Image: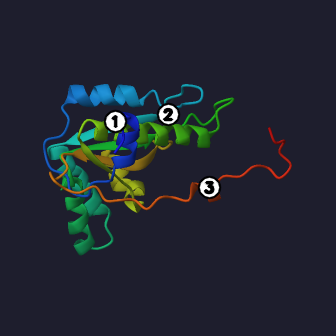
Amino acid sequence: MTADPVLEAILTRRSCVRLTGPAPDRDDLIDLIQASATAPDHGLIRPWRLIILEGDDRQVLGKAMRDAAADPEQGDRAATRPLRAPLLLSIVFCPERDHPTVREWEQLAAVAGMAQTLQILLHSRGWGTIWRTGSIVEAPQVREYLELTATEQLLGWLYIGTSPTGAPIPVRKPVDVVSRISRPRHAARV
């Protein structure tokens, strides 16, 4: 597609619904998280933390999801969701609410930037990912299992693993970016 590996990774990254093992080992994962921590972060607050879930931890999370479900049938489906990948990273927003200069929305943007950078880095190394969210992130049972504080917000899970081999990369329809770019009406033309 392109000779630029960064552009290639950005253009070819897709969410992978089905992921199998293996997943990155701890050292590789830590290296990629370290690199993703360089994403823009006004004030260098690092308003996030990641909770690693693998092995039986995923089943315990599934039990918390089952307990949070409205009915048994929903609960049974919810309990299997964390098993869709060998490794999950819980993305936790930890805002510094009384920061003198960095607003909370800027801190949230920093977390999203870090998570997106991590997805691109994982993809560039051949790993598949999908960022899963939903109302379950607010369930008391899930928050309790993850030991979240009252000021923390769960932004979902980054599911990580191996993508099915030979799966074609879906073509994305180009976005009409020109229609989303403007200038103030009275801007000086240079």
Pointer 1 residue: 121
Marks 2, 1: nearer the viewer: 1
Pointer 3 residue: 178
Q: Residue at x 64, y 31 (%)?
A: 99
Quarter of the image for residue 25 reads top left
Secondary structure at numbered mark 3:
helix
At label 3, the amino acid type is Val
Quarter of the image for residue 176 reads bottom right
Rendered location of residue 40, percent (x, y): 53, 31
- In the rendered view, tell whether residue 31 sits above or below residue 24: above
At label 1, the amino acid type is Leu
Asked whether residue 156 is in view, the answer is yes
Label whose residue precedes the other's in the sequence (3 or 1):
1
Quick one: 133 or 129, which is closer to the camera?
A: 129
Q: Residue at x 24, y 42 (%)?
A: 127
Q: Residue at x 68, y 30 (%)?
A: 101
Rendered location of residue 10, percent (x, y): 39, 43
Rendered location of residue 105, percent (x, y): 60, 43
How far is disc 2 from disc 3 in space, using C-alphas? Answer: 33 Å
Left or right position of 20 against 176:
left
Where, quadrant-wise, is the N terminus in this rendering?
top left
Q: Which mark is residue 187?
A: none
Instruction: Describe the colour scheme in one phrase.
Output: rainbow
Left or right position of 76 against 100:
left
At label 2, the amino acid type is Pro
- In the rendered view, tell whether residue 148 sits above or below residue 43: below
How far is disc 3 from disc 1 in space, using C-alphas? Answer: 28 Å
Pointer 2 residue: 47
Where, quadrant-wise, is the C terminus in this rendering?
top right
Label whose residue precedes the other's in the sequence (2 or 3):
2
